[in-house]
Amino acid sequence: MSVDKNMNVLIVDDYKTMLRIIRNLLKQLGFNNVDEATDGSMALQMLRVGNYGLVISDWNMEPMTGLQLLREVRADAKMKSVPFIMVTAESKSENVVAAKEAGVSNYIVKPFNAETLKSKMASVLGDF
Amino acid sequence: MPVKGGDRDLELRLDAIRREHGESVRLDQIAEVVRAMLDTISGDISAADLRLYSELESLADYIHNAKAELAALRPGEIKDQFIATATDELDAIVGATEAATNQILDAMEHLEALAPMMDKDVADRMTEITTQVFEACNFQDITGQRITKVVRVLKEIEARVDSLVAAFGQEVGAASAAQPEPSAPASDADLLNGPQLPASAANQAEIDRLLASFD
């Protein structure tokens, strides 16, 4: 399966610096069509009108968390199959289990490096 | 037998017995008088009442001492000064690290923009290095989240101090406000305040003016 690097990627985090870091790492991996949202509800609105091939989201955000966003995405007929990677500092096993039960595609614990981001994306999208 | 004390009913009762029987009184009549006396006493206060009173007195002493100890801890100062200062300092850390991280990211992005002008090997090596810098900048998010947790704990302590002051009465808070600060001259240690918060920090121009004022 070949990965379309021109796909739209939505990154969601309430820390603007983290959005910037992920955007730059994605750019280095060849993904240049990147949109940003600063919480779950903003991301949900963007997902409803846009066409995204991947969501990379933080967990701990207000008013809508990454987990709530994931549940909304999986409950929506149009968005339910969009690959969703959680990138979070929440590293307790119960968090991972909750995310898995909600339908997360993969899970990255902060702090992370470019190689981890690439390998998790590859596991979801296929090698690139 | 004369009755000491002012119990008029008891005296009348004894006088009536004397009038009827002289100085020789039957045991059952004495018992009746004693019972009447005991009834009088138990009508006012019982042994259980005395124990309860004693317990209440101890409790009152305990509360009084606790209030004095709480006042000595200066809860108002903890809330208004220590916790407020600590949260301001932590907010300043988050602000400063965020600004510094953005500055580093700016520099890295400008550096990356130079890549097309470089030899491919050099450009690739530079990308590796900028990637490492991007990865390292993760710290700002992590430290920010940790500091937010600490601020949340401080707010919880503040709320509990408030509850304590409310439960023990306003004099605990008032007492803490009334205690004046000792006015000892500033020692060398007192001068070690660390970096000032941005809002209250003097900038270089102000420092220069102050220095010039000594000339």
Image (cartoon, coloured by chain):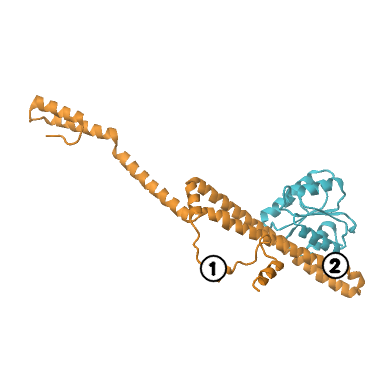
Chain colours: A cyan, B orange
Q: Pick whichever, A59 or B211, lies toward us.
A: B211
Residue at point 57%, 49% (across, down): B159
Residue B186's label in the rendered image is: 1
Point out the residue furthest to the top here.
Answer: B20
> According to the image, label 2 marks what residue?
B110
> CB under 8 Å between callouts 1 and 2?
no
Quadrant of the rendering where the C terminus of chain B is positioned = bottom right
Q: Give the residue at x 86% y 46%.
A: A49
Amino acid type, label 2? His
Which residue lies most toward the front here?
Answer: B215
Is any part of residue B49 visible from this angle? Answer: yes
Residue at the image position 86 percent from the left and 53 percent from the top: A53
Disc 1: CA contacts within 10 A as few (<14), some (14-19) or many (>=20): few
* Image quadrant where residue B111 sits: bottom right
Q: Dot 1 falls on which chain?
A: B
**Nearest to the observer: residue B197 or residue B132:** B197
N-term mark: 1 or 2: 2
Give the position of the N terminus of chain B as an image quadrant.
top left
* B142 with respect to B168 (left or right): right
Residue density around tag 2, few if under 14, some if 14–19, many if 20 or more, within 10 Å: few
Q: Label 1 vs label 2: CA separation?
A: 48 Å
For residue B200, above or below residue B116:
above
Q: Amino acid at mark 1?
A: Ala
Q: Position of residue B104 (x, y in %)?
A: 78, 67
Q: Secondary structure at mark 1?
A: loop
Q: Are marks 1 and 2 on the same chain?
A: yes
Foreground label between 1 and 2: 1
The number of numbered discs placed on residues in the rendered structure image is: 2
